Image (cartoon, grey):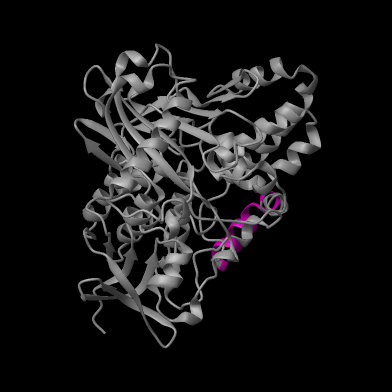
Amino acid sequence: MAYSADVIIVGSGIGGLTAAALLQERGFSTLTFEKNKYPGGSCASFTRQGYTFDVGASVFYGFSGDDKSGTLNLHTRIFNRLGVDVRTIPDPVQIHYHLPNGFEVPVFYEKDRFLGILIRRFPHQEAGIRAFYQELESVYDILSALPAGSLEDFVHVIQVGAGNPGKTMALALKTFQSMGKVARKYITDEELLQFIDMESYSWAVQDAVSTPLVNAGICLADRHHGGINYPVGGAGAIPAALCEGIKKFGGAVKYSCDVEEIILKDGRAEGVRLSNGEVFTGRAVISNATVWDTFNRLVKDPRYNIPENRFLRAPSWFQLYLGVDADVVPEGFHVHHILVDDWERYSEIGGTIYFSTPSVLDASVAPEGKHAVHVFVTDEVHRWNSYRRGDSAYKKAKEAFGASVIKRTEKILPGLGDALKVKVLATPLTNQRYLNRYKGSYGPLLYPGQNVLQKPQNRTAVKNLYATGDSTFPGQGVIAVTYSGVSCASYVARKLGSPLDYL
């Protein structure tokens, strides 16, 4: 059979692009289809009136220049392998938290400086603070010593286990642990435990008890090793570089190509059909869509349907992309902020405000004398389903909700509302439409108490159909979906007869 490519990739999110780039560099032909006119999914950028806004992600790990530090330094290693360059700017603070009762916590790159802030507020918990964050450090130490690969690849697992028996066993035991339960072994102060919940909620949209310790160890330790680094020109620089690598080795990324169906025959994936009727075939298909979009929309056979309640569905977002006068942002203002007004409401819809001003680091993303600001809160698509796109009622509701978020945000940035020059508002309906994500969701989450290894891996119930992205292990976040892309490429390459070299 003459194939269109060895591997067909559905969607140009970071997981899909990473898998495509590594497979293409290995010598497999790949063909990636993207609905939009640009790559990246939630890790993309768009421009308005001279401003560059990040669609979603803006906190990035994995870019350290030190090959011995960072969460496997995946971005650095991948781009080195592809021979493409992504310039970044180090960010000295991961997130500045503004919490009830005047509790302010900037999470500095220097770990001792960060821990010192917590210890000064909770001197009676010093031993517990140090012990808990050392637990996260121990997870990081294990992960950074093990090569990235698929946990479904028997050969990889045997090789890693044989070469690192102690670390492999220790990691296996830690997969059964929860971040919040480990914290409660060492810490008793309720306000401090609430902060640790926010440390988890900031990226997992779950409290610490619901968050696997392994996931927490990746994000909350690596920030003090590889650090946080912002790509020059915005988040879109990452998918652009992956696309450059794909094309460099002969692959193709096709835009404005909406995949209508993943074609199955006798229980195996054979290719895809686009919305215009064109059919493309491959030896393997990789879906970067959510688990619900893949099996309830793209795979037409109802036997493979995935009930929504198979997993916890993370909420969607209401997002504000703002261009503002530079003088509203004070000297020394950090890039990323999280604002919690009330501990009782932080996990409710809209209860926590996420805020970033990347132009503080990278002046190229805003016109001279201006700043680019991204503000967002959790939201749900059902709150907007009664509106029709383009209707005045829809616009009025967006404006009203956006104004309420801006007003709350002025607690950390006074005068924001009066400094606006550009305003773009996006509801969960926007996320659903542009990102092709079920209900605009941030993706599937594990139920409290589930082992992190119960997260779907790269194989699926359909032969020759694989998955990557935030629906797969290890979960949400750019570095996590990058790992899933590496894992998926590793597994597919071995199945197709030419295993990847370790990064």
The residue at the far bottom in this view is: 266
Magenta residue check for 162: yes
Q: Position of residue 128 (x, y in %)?
A: 77, 28
Q: Is residue 503 visible?
A: no
Q: Is residue 303 visible?
A: yes
- In the image, 370 versus 26, the foreground residue is 370
Q: Position of residue 443 (x, y in %)?
A: 49, 55
Q: Position of residue 105 (x, y in %)?
A: 59, 22
| Residue drawn 41% across the image and 50% down it | 428
Indicate whether 229 appears above or below 41: above
Indicate whether 17 appears above or below 85: below
Q: Which residues are magenta?
A: 154-167
| Residue drawn 70% across the image and 47% down it | 178
Magenta residue check for 166: yes
Question: Quadrant of the rendered structure where residue 404 is?
Answer: top left
Left or right of residue 267, residue 360 in this image: left
| Residue drawn 68% across the image and 57% down it | 450
Instruction: Name the quarter where the N terminus is drawn.
Output: bottom left
Q: Name the dominant secondary structure of the magenta segment.
A: helix
Left or right of residue 374, residue 226 in this image: right
| Residue drawn 60% across the image and 41% down it | 347
